[in-house]
Image: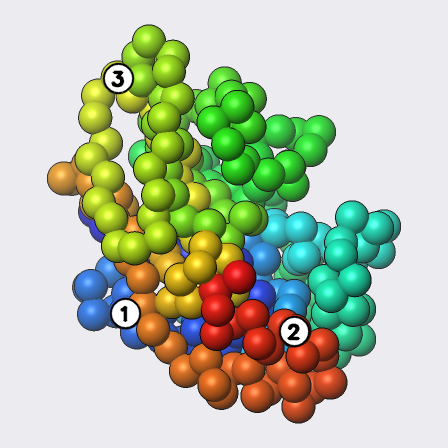
Amino acid sequence: MKYAIISDIHGNLEALETALKEIEKEGIKYIFSAGDIVGYGADPEKCIELIRSRGISSVMGNHDYAVNNTSEEELFNSYARLAIQWTRNTISEDAKNFLSSLPFSVVKDDFTLFHGALDEESPFNYILMPADSELSFQNLTTQVGFFGHSHVAGCFIKSENGIISYRSGIIDCEISIEEGNKYLINVGSVGQPRDGNPNGAFAIFDTDKRIVRIKRFAYDIEKASKKIIDAGLPRFLAERLFEGV
């Protein structure tokens, strides 16, 4: 079985549509989202509609959560706060209800899906360094966990002896899922990469071959950027797409 795992779409319809075309080329039918469908980008409603129409199972991201919980904005920087306020005022009540219905995590037979961390008290903590991953590894009940949040693709690997190592996914990479190890894999961002590579990212998990591949893809950044500016959102949110920051 092959699964595609996307994350951090952030209202970027051009990136989402391209990612789904790339997934279709791979012959993959089952797609999961690690959250943050909305925020930053100019097409939150259309991204939600596409996620729902394609039957893509998603977990709750912090921007998804903030749409219906204004207190979450206190943790956002000024650009993120303005964008989520704009999103809240733009999307339909039906879309808001959909976002509020998303779970914080999902467990499949072969993997666990979450947004920031496997931490019931602080699900939107960041896993940036090996030390940050320890609690999530402790709470991981499957061999593999997929997440997003930092917009930086890569893999934390915990060996049988408890040592945690890291492998970057800034460019395409392939990760072999070896017996005895546990894996926390950041699938990167579809709509706003921050690892210096402006190409979108997602992961493909082949459960038969026990291989995870992080795939990067180019999309129409110019169009997505123009939409952000035309919507009256901060220009920085448009410009950063070209740099992958």
Q: Quadrant of residue 180?
A: top left
Labels 1, 2: front one: 2
Crowd class of label 2 (few under 14; some 14 to 19; many from 20; radius 10 Å): few
Q: Is residue 101 left or right of residue 195?
A: right
Find the distance from the CA under tag 3 to the CA under tag 2.
Answer: 44 Å
Q: Position of residue 192 (x, y in %)?
A: 52, 64
Q: Residue at x 53, y 61 (%)?
A: 245
Residue 236 circle label: 2
Residue 58 in sight here:
no
Q: Position of residue 106 (x, y in %)?
A: 49, 40
Crowd class of label 1 (few under 14; some 14 to 19; many from 20; radius 10 Å): some
Position above or below: 240 against 105: below
Q: Secondary structure at mark 2?
A: helix
- The amino acid pointed to by label 3 is Gly
Q: Position of residue 45 (x, y in %)?
A: 62, 76
Find the distance from the CA under tag 1 to the CA under tag 2.
Answer: 28 Å
Position above or below: 90 against 105: below
Q: Secondary structure at mark 3?
A: loop
- The amino acid pointed to by label 1 is Glu
Q: Is residue 96 left or right of residue 196?
A: right
